[in-house]
Amino acid sequence: MRSYPPFDTAMAKARPAPQDHTPDRGLRADARRNRDKLLAAADEVFTEQGADASLDEVARRAEVGIGTLYRHFPTREALLSAACDERLFALADKSRAQADSIPASEALTRFLEDLARHAGSYRGLAAALGVVLKCGTPGCHATTSQGQALLERAQRAREVRRDVAFDDLVCLTTAVSLAAAGSGPQETRRLRRLVAMFMDGVRAR
Amino acid sequence: MRSYPPFDTAMAKARPAPQDHTPDRGLRADARRNRDKLLAAADEVFTEQGADASLDEVARRAEVGIGTLYRHFPTREALLSAACDERLFALADKSRAQADSIPASEALTRFLEDLARHAGSYRGLAAALGVVLKCGTPGCHATTSQGQALLERAQRAREVRRDVAFDDLVCLTTAVSLAAAGSGPQETRRLRRLVAMFMDGVRAR
DNA sequence: ACCTGAACACCGTTCAAGT
DNA sequence: ACCTGAACACCGTTCAAGT
């Protein structure tokens, strides 16, 4: 088991607003450009080859030295979560937009389904989801705080047990994503079924 | 993402009986000895370093050429599941012994808890549990058939929904094990709580 | 039949030299 | 301040030569 060095939190800077969430302050123009190229390349490569694709390949496709990759993203997880960040932001936004118009536990269920689908966007992302969601990236933060808010709301409405923690739900999502690896219609059905079953268990009675 | 070659099913021979489950037929004495040394070494190394420890290290500690390791176990999963086999056998036996004297869903719950604990015996085994349980090793087979039997019994007793598949339960176990990584008293408590919650969702209503 | 280990291809990570 | 890529250490896998 390889042990990654501790995540460099300096890499995860607070973003000014959901619309403008690129950390351009304190980055030289060329550095900023390289960072963007790296993210685009990472998204491509991870999508094609899975979450443990070669980082060399990412650097090559970004037309950037491998050292530059490490300078920007000291660990694989840092790159992984940065590459997912847009998606996570979108997920949190979508949930916030629709949450108030539907019942608490329904909102929570939809959120978890989306999260499970997100974890399936790269092969191998699901297993890393727990780590990725704790990496401090803005998108991660948006997602976890939205999830936590939904959970608390459902608990206040007495629709969900009090002894359920957000981490339990992340754990469920991990499981469901692992089980639903691939994203055909069959997997999607299974995903929804598993989320529903777990939510039945989580529901207050 | 590394793609492993397809698992060589010739490696997983049917065993004569639960008590004597070492494939000694068709193996020369020295080969048999090497196989045993490899399994003992693998158990040690995986326990110390996790499920993705170096296979070189395993061969070295078994005092065997690396080629011999690959001859006996063509994939990491093959070695992993062979090394777990005793444990899985014991798990199935224990469950069989106690199952008839307790209610169906209780027996199933205990079985799943044990399986989750098993998945925690090596760091990183949980994520591979789905694959390991499908590798055809005798211990895997004993475990899956016992689990399937317990599930069917609980379904006949109308204690568990009909639309639950054994794979769903394996998926749960994976999740719970991932969430309960580590094996302190806190993790064990969490493990039992998560299993209980999922079982509530799985329960017929 | 089976074992051995050198050889090959590949990957992650660092760091001295460059701009 | 940032980039580069050669260099190093390590790992998985194969296969020709040996018993």
Image (cartoon, coloured by chain):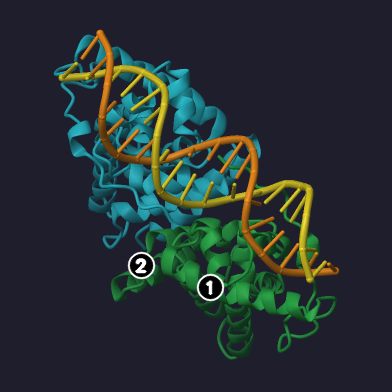
Chain colours: A cyan, B green, C orange, D yellow
The image position of residue B55, as x and y in percent, is 56, 59
Which quadrant holds the C terminus of chain A? bottom left
The image position of residue A160, as x and y in percent, is 32, 55
A71 or B3: nearer the viewer? A71
Q: Nearer the viewer, mark 2 or mark 1?
A: 1
A183 or B160: nearer the viewer? A183
| Residue type highlighted by circle 1 | Asp
Image mark 1: chain: B
Which label is found at residue B43? Answer: 1
Q: Residues within 10 Å of mark 1 (few under 14, many from 20)?
A: many
Q: Residues within 10 Å of mark 2 (few under 14, many from 20)?
A: some
Judging from the image, what secondary structure is the residue with disc 2 in?
A: loop
Q: Is residue A183 left or right of residue A82?
A: right
Q: Residue at x 29, y 56 (%)?
A: A165
Image mark 2: chain: B
Which label is found at residue B182? Answer: 2
Judging from the image, what secondary structure is the residue with disc 1 in?
A: helix
Q: Earlier in the sequence, mark 2 or mark 1?
A: 1
Distance, label 2 to label 1, CA atoms, is 17 Å
Which quadrant of the figure has residue B1? Answer: top right
Q: How many marks?
A: 2
Which quadrant holds the N terminus of chain A? bottom left
The image position of residue B73, as x and y in percent, is 68, 62
Q: Residue at x 38, y 63 (%)?
A: B181
Which label is found at residue A91? Answer: none
